[in-house]
Amino acid sequence: MSNRQKALNLLGLATRARKLVSGTEIVVGAIKKGKAKCVIIANDLADNGQEEVRSALKQHPVPLVAAFSSEELSQAIGKQRKVLALTDSGFAKALQAKIKEGV
């Protein structure tokens, strides 16, 4: 199994563990409250959606991952979403490690 697939499987696991939030408004809220440990945006997300997330990240910096398409993210978590945030530091570190290994 590729690191890319392992990273996507990790997002599915985080979803089932209720350690992942999705949707632009909810993710931006999690960033502002300091609950987001890692933000994942689809690499095909529209500019205005990206801008909203990036401006929130400027005020509350957390790692940002844009390595997956919206289709991959939606399939991984079982919902049509383009913006996700991990709320658990263990999942966030594991995802970043998989991406550093090469996605």
Image: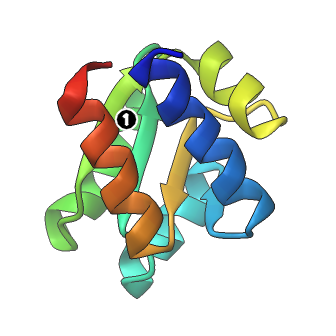
89 left or right of 15 in image: left
Count of numbered circles on the image: 1
Which scheme is used to colour this image of the protein? Answer: rainbow
- Tell me the SS state at disc 1: helix
| Residue at left offset 70%, top offset 44% | 12
| Residue at left offset 75%, top offset 24% | 75
Q: Is residue 50 above or below residue 10?
A: above
Residue 18 visible in the picture: yes
Q: Is residue 64 above or below residue 59?
A: above
* Residue at the limit of the structure toward the right, as seen here: 78
Measured as percent of width and height from the top left, residue 11 is found at: 60, 45
In the picture of the structure, the residue carrying the numbered disc 1 is 50
Sort mark 1 into few (<14), some (14-19) or many (20+) by Cα contacts within 10 Å: some
* Residue at the limit of the structure toward the front, as seen here: 1
89 left or right of 17 in image: left
Residue 46 visible in the picture: no
Measured as percent of width and height from the top left, residue 2 is found at: 46, 15
Q: Pick the quarter of the image with the N terminus.
A: top right
59 left or right of 3 in image: left
| Residue at left offset 22%, top offset 29% | 101
Q: Which quarter of the picture shows residue 20?
A: bottom right
Measured as percent of width and height from the top left, residue 96 is found at: 28, 46
Q: Pick the quarter of the image with the C terminus.
A: top left
- Decide which of 24, 6 is in the foreground and name it: 6
Measured as percent of width and height from the top left, residue 67 is found at: 35, 23
In the rendered structure, which amino acid carries the disc numbered 1? Gln
| Residue at left offset 51%, top offset 72% | 87
